[in-house]
Image (cartoon, coloured by chain):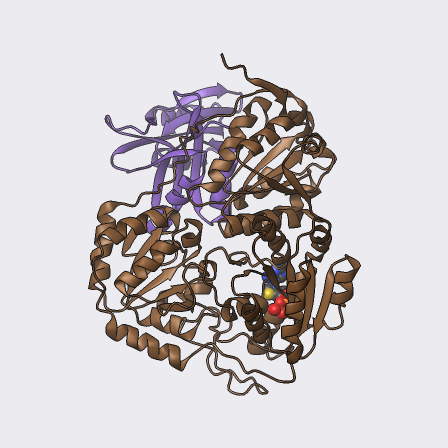
Amino acid sequence: MNMPDIMTGAEAVVESLRREGIEIVFGYPGGAVLPLYDVLYESDIRHILVRHEQGAAHAADGYARATGKVGVCIATSGPGATNLVTGIATAYMDSVPIVALTGQVPRVLIGNDAFQEADICGITMPITKHNYLVKDEQELPRIMKEAFYIASTGRPGPVLIDLPKDVQTEEIEFDYPKEIVMRGYKPKVKGNEQQIKRAALTILESERPVIYAGGGVIISNASEELRMLAEKIMAPVTASLMGTGAFPDEHPLSLGMLGMHGTRYANYAIQQSDLIIAIGTRFDDRATGKVDAFAPEAKIIHIDVDPAEIGKNVRVDIPIVGDCKQVLQSLLKYIDRACNSEVWLRKVEEWKKEYPLTYTYSESVIKPQYVVEEIYRACKDAIIVTEVGQNQMWARQFFRYKDPRTFISSGGLGTMGYGFPASIGAKLGRPDKVVFDIAGDGSFLMNSQELATAVSNDVPVIVAILNNGYLGMVRQWQELFFCRRYSHTCLEGSVDFVKLAESYGALGLRAERPSEVRGVIEEALRANMPTVIDFICDPEENVMPMVPAGAAINEFVEVRNKSENKLLVGAVA
Amino acid sequence: MRYTLAVLVENKPGVLARVAGLFARRGYNIDSLAVGVTDNPEISRMTIVVRGDEKVIEQVIKQLNKLVDVIKISMLSEKESVERSLALFKVSADSKTRPTIMQIVDIFRAKIIDVGSKSLIIEITGDEDKINAMERLLRSYGILEVCRTGKIAMNRGLKSVSYEK
Ligand SMILES: Cc1ncc(C[n+]2csc(CCOP(=O)(O)OP(=O)(O)O)c2C)c(N)n1
Ligand SMILES: [Mg+2]
């Protein structure tokens, strides 16, 4: 007979982590997780002590995005748990599998406003895929098993487990379930064959097809199938921000990103297409612009694992619910030739020639786009993590991505401060890769304390601050839509980033002229240690092209003269 | 339009909060909600009346389905289902008005479940229209207190909302 092991709740949690193959966790201790930390003390699971719990959530998220595995973060009750909230919401919006373990006050005190009590299950209900308050220690193995299963299957997402302190110390019979029985959770992975056939016929009839790929392609590891589909039917491919890396930027059929800061040719192609094949994407307003004016001439095929995304934002002609990879594999079976897209591809090619992504290089002042290009030149297969704002858009526009999981960015929530801790998680998950955090001077300060984490754990990430002295993206909107009234967006004179880095024991570098850019990047790469590079950039560079919020995606902002900043087209958001 | 949903959920603490929270944060309008356990003690049944157009109701159902604790959702059609709710009315009644009130109670096949010297409590079950009609009639006697449940509903005939493994 199989004797179940007797162990404490805390031991059961750690044993469950081991059974799930977890090698690394990100956390910060406190009273309500003392028993758990006591077990971690002797465990072979690596614990990374962050310096703020938000950093733990983002690091777990960056780890998950870079590796495709589940990221784990730990915080104590009350303020520890609430500090995770932004990180959990970030992961939720971008469908990232993380499991958050929080301490909770002992069961008898729950509901009494006990010291460091916060109802974290209530707080995170709208930003988790599911959450648990463990009321019976015997349920721990089942809950742990379910949590990892829910986080990583279907449309992935964060799951939180709230662990009252006394649950961690009670003894249980540990028997890790082999199977999962959840009558309310059965993700559908296989697409409807009839619908897939219909989709294939529609595809073969189309003459102006565009494939619109999203983060779902990356999540389901369907990049190869995506490429095969595009090449087989000869359709150009655009991707949302989250879909960056799903299809190689250098591929002749690539259109780059669509939407607010997408390429002109991607947006024009969408607007004139007769068939949109949307794969693993949710038609976010940043990608579609004004929904009623989106792809007015196109039929839409929508493939997604989450049925609730289908028909949510745009009308869909052929819905297919299922895992992107599986659906694409089935779809490919029905496709034996290309569409009649030759004329269309020539037109797309003309747009690409006519409206390339560009900027005006300067000899005297560093253009942020130039920094991104130089990072690309120096390290083409780096993982690029970003902060939020202009830096994020330039990181997308001027680096040429070729592989999935090499562009990591907070797309849905747009969380400033995400990039740096996420880059630590990404580097720990992919130590073989060079990892850059392309940052803004505002965003970096939101989690710069994680320099201590990077230094003490020897995680050699490179933070490239595109320092424009502004909350640049907000300033850009003020410039374009609020008559250049720069209300509280100037960060001038705030920090010496070199000294900041040095005070943590990291390497601090600075480039003030374009001629210095290449040198400092190379120096940072050679140093192979946590590094911050302060690139002093043109303060008022704008991200272009730009479609104003609420406009159709072919209605671009036209800036006639940079010094006047006259607006020709543009709705105010 | 109003739609009636029968929703089977895990009979666990917090499930009502998950469902109610979903409606609140996505801006769906609930007209009424009633919950009770089913013949399987692990499963509760909610009857939810939602207001919205077809697109909204489709989203409501899909979003509800995403909740891990939601097991099954069925939409009940007005024609093919029966619905009931229950109401208690406390009305003021003296020796003069009592007989006419009791007549109304009779006509509606309602019940008097408490008699005080100056008041009565009336219990009525029925569909909403019936309860509303009674309320209108009682109003002139002076309604002191009203307590109404959410609606519950069930398919007519053999068709049933149940969970099969
Ligand atoms: C936590 C958070 N607060 C506020 C915002 C709003 N916001 C979006 S971009 C931006 C400016 C970012 O400035 P910086 O990091 O310097 O990047 P830049 O745009 O200058 O490259 C702000 C404030 C946000 N996205 N996240
Ligand atoms: Mg800035």
Q: Is residue A117 visible?
A: yes
Query: Percent position (x, y) of residue B53?
Result: 34, 51
Q: Is residue A468 visible?
A: no
Residue displayed at 59% across by 39% down: A23
Q: Is residue A38 left or right of residue A438?
A: right
Q: Is residue A306 left or right of residue A205?
A: right
Q: How many marks?
A: 0
Judging depth in this view, the residue of B30 and A471 nearest the camera is: A471
Residue displayed at 25% across by 37% down: B79
Query: Percent position (x, y) of residue A27?
Result: 67, 42
Answer above or below: position of A184 versus A81.
Answer: above
Query: Percent position (x, y) of residue B89?
Result: 47, 29
What colour denotes chain B? purple
Answer above or below: position of A100 versus A421.
Answer: above
Classify residue A300 by image quadrant.
bottom left
Judging depth in this view, the residue of A562 and B47 nearest the camera is: A562
Answer above or below: position of A341 versus A64.
Answer: below
What colour denotes chain A? brown
Classify residue B81 by image quadrant.
top left
Query: Percent position (x, y) of residue A112?
Result: 70, 31
- Determine the quadrant in which ligand 1 lies: bottom right
Judging depth in this view, the residue of A298 and A417 nearest the camera is: A417
